[in-house]
Image (cartoon, grey):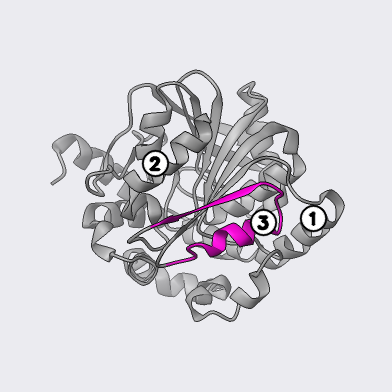
Amino acid sequence: MLTSFHRVIFDAVLSAAVLVLPLIATSPAAAEVKPWPASFRAQQMPVTGGTQYVRVGGEGPAVLLLHGFGDTGDMWEPLAEILVKDHTVIIPDLRGMGLSSHPEGGYEKLAQGRDIAAILGQLKIQKVALVTHDIGNMVGYALAAQYPERITKWVVIDAPLPGLGTWYSLLSNPKVWHFNFRGPDVERLVAGRERILLDRFYNDLSANPAAIDEQTRDYYAALYARPNAIHDAFSGQFAAFAQDAEDNRALFAKTGKLPMPVLAIGGDHSFGASMQSELASVASNVQGAVITNSGHWIMEEQPQQAISIIVPFIEK
């Protein structure tokens, strides 16, 4: 049940009137909206053609967390709450998503990687450990391949990379129907029905849909109902995949395998152990891990399992 404090915040998101929002996400015990630790601050930071909403907290070695579609940076709160005790933790909302601005272009992952590097520069952070999920993996690869000296290690969670590994065979899987689901008529159909759309992903791509509770679903649906949010997800992030595939193949041909240690994590009801071989095609030092009783939504379905694997890898 939402407290009166959270109801005010939730209603503000629904009205799309919030410029600075308390940092909220799912707790490890139950997928419940809750405030972030007071040690985090948030700001809109300039990037090419717009701004990105960035949360920063803590002190010490830096860790950068990148989310994917169906979530925002809020998905990382359970992990960030642990890391912030002895790390500087940086959590952007990706371009055109969450509380970031909505430029029409710039969704190619190489461009987004450069924007993330610029954000780190503004924060005067030179090196980071990187943790990514879903589309965040794609932006993460673009960042790591263009700036390998800035990434100390990389945790990659449950999604492949455009143009690399098994990407082209994946395109025939009916579960990725949404990769080409875009256009003005689609946006008209989805408008006001964002919760229905997101439920399809949460239900179909999870091992236990109940792990993503009603409060969490409503919260993300409200963020994806903000003006231009669905447009930027589908006609921005997803529409760029074809160009991302070409860019990644050219970048890999130029730079070869990534040198930093990589931990590739998959849910046992999703990519599972195949994540290790997927990343071994682009990185030279890859460990694998499988989260049990989980689909794609690992930080919602099994956050404690994920945390118990990710934190030791980062701190090792």
Q: At x 77% / y 64%, what residue is drawn? A: 246
Please say whether residue 37 is visible from this viewpoint.
yes
* Disc 2 secondary structure class: helix
Left or right: 254 in relation to 69: right
Residue 48, visible in the rendered structure: no
Question: Label 3, on which residue?
Answer: 280
x and y percentages locating residue 249 in the rendered image: 78, 61
The three-letter code of the residue at mark 3 reads Ala
| First along the sequence among labels 2 and 3 | 3
Across and down, in percent, residue 167 comes to 65, 69
**Quadrant of res 159:** bottom right
Which structural element holds mark 1?
A: helix
Q: Residue at x 25, y 45 (%)?
A: 11
Determine which quarter of the picture holds residue 225.
bottom left
Q: Which residues are magenta?
A: 270-291
Residue at disc 3, secondary structure = helix
**How far apart in space, not on screen, are marks 2 and 1 (Cα)?**
30 Å
Q: Nearer the viewer, residue 138 or 40?
A: 138
**Which label is found at residue 307?**
2
- Of the residues tagged 2 and 3, which is closer to the observer? 3
Q: CA distance from mark 2 to mark 3?
A: 22 Å
Q: Is residue 287 highlighted in magenta?
A: yes
Instruction: Identify residue for label 1.
Output: 252
Front-most of residues 179 and 151: 151
Q: Residue at x 61, y 41 (%)?
A: 50
